[in-house]
Amino acid sequence: MSNLIWTDNPVTTSTRIRAVHMNELRSAIDRDRAAVGLAPYAWSDGTITSSIRIRAVHFTEARSAIPQAQ
């Protein structure tokens, strides 16, 4: 399995969270889900673009999807 490449690595307290960060996180979660035989998570917004604001639901979904892959 290849290593993930993260944008703005490391993210610090002064890093503005952008669409690319959320999409990278989602890709990592879906990769872990696939590794244990699960389908990709059904993200509410699909791919986040720069026109979509990062919202609390995006983090809530990520937190829900991670334990399923463990």
Image (cartoon, rainbow, N blue to C red):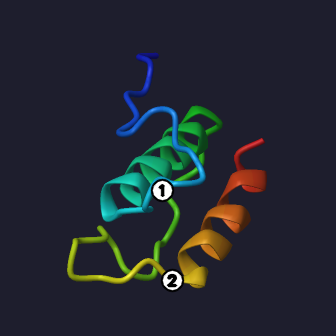
Which mark's residue is nearer the viewer, 2 or 1?
Answer: 2
As drawn, the label of residue 12 is none
Taking the image as shown, residue 28 lies to the left or right of residue 33, namely left
**Could you tell me which secondary element the residue under label 1 belongs to?**
loop
Q: Residue at x 39, y 39 (%)?
A: 8
- Residue 39, given in percent of the width and then of the height, sits at 51, 54
Q: Is residue 39 above or below residue 3?
A: below
**Could you tell me which secondary element the residue under label 2 belongs to?**
loop
Q: Residue at x 40, y 53 (%)?
A: 21
Cα distance, mark 2 to mark 1? Answer: 20 Å
Taking the image as shown, residue 66 lies to the left or right of residue 12, namely right
Q: Bin the neighbour count of mark 1 within 10 Å (Cα to Cα): few under 14, some 14-19, many 20 and up.
A: some
N-terminal label among 2 and 1: 1
Tell me the quarter of the picture where residue 32 sits. top right
Q: Bin the neighbour count of mark 2 within 10 Å (Cα to Cα): few under 14, some 14-19, many 20 and up.
A: few
Q: Amino acid at mark 1?
A: Pro
Look at the image and tell me in which quarter the C terminus lies.
Answer: top right
Taking the image as shown, residue 67 lies to the left or right of residue 42, namely right
Q: Which residue is mark 1?
A: 40
Q: Residue at x 44, y 77 (%)?
A: 54
Q: Is residue 61 above or below residue 68?
A: below
Residue farthest to the front?
14
As drawn, the label of residue 55 is 2
Q: Residue at x 53, y 40 (%)?
A: 34
Q: Is residue 54 above or below residue 13?
A: below
Q: Who is closer to the viewer here, 46 or 25?
A: 25
